[in-house]
Image: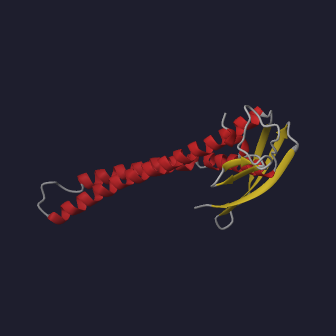
Amino acid sequence: MIQANHCDLCEHSKRNLKNGLTCGLTDRKPDFNTTCTKINLDRKFQEKLEIANLELEIIRRNQKPTHLTFYGTIIIGFLLILLGYFLSDWKIFSFYLWYVKIGIIGAGFTFFGTAYSKLNKYRREDKKAKLIKIKIDEVLIKYGISYDQSFDFKEKIHGTQEVIVKVEFKNWTKVQTTNTYKFDYE
């Protein structure tokens, strides 16, 4: 059992370079098998849960534009390679034309690399967000806490997006929480 997943959500956890992860109540390393009887899930837990779910929702909303960008960039790269290849006859002895053809073909392959890197970045971010959410959900299952969340994305103003996150809990001290988060698009 990885106690750090429990302690990361608890208000009592303390971390420092000398001792690592310790319980703020006992000043010792966490020592429990399945659940901690003294766990205090409050603001820290609530914020981590909301942010993890919000990040995953933002990534899911960006899935379609990311894939459209990927395919569009691949098509442009392919067209540049074809244009470079068929620009003029390869038998022409002008070095200038050779440089232009090779430059256009090189630009086409650069588009391929750009498309792949954008898709790969999306996949890494998605995998990371899912892993964080899974870790939090595994801990909540141990304590019998379940939740439903909803997101209200407001209008973007100057690149800043405001999102209202509502979470309804079952089997936790709070029944419902509502918080607002703002983030900037890169």
Q: Position of residue 152 (x, y in %)?
A: 76, 52
Image location (x, y in percent) of residue 36: 78, 37
Decide if residue 12 is on the left or right side of residue 99.
right
Q: Which image quadrant for residue 155?
A: bottom right
- Please say if 143 is above or below 24: above
Taking depth in this image into account, of 78 and 134 the one nearest to the observer is 134
Q: What residue is at 33 percent from the left and 54 percent from the top?
A: 108
The image shows residue 182 at horizontal and vertical percentages of 71, 60
Q: Judge whether 34 appears above or below 62 on screen.
A: above
Q: Quadrant of residue 87?
A: bottom left
In the picture shown, does residue 176 fall above or below 158?
above
Q: Quadrant of the N terminus?
A: top right
Residue extending farthest bottom: 158
All told, the count of numbered labels is 0
Name the one closer to the observer, 91 or 104: 104
Q: Quadrant of the C terminus?
A: bottom right
In the image shown, does 60 or 9 lie closer to the viewer?
9
- Residue at the image position 20 percent from the left and 56 percent from the top: 88
Residue 48: where, in percent of width, then height? 72, 49
Query: What's the colour scheme?
Result: secondary structure
Residue at 72% across, 52% down: 14
Specify whether 9 is left or right of 175: left
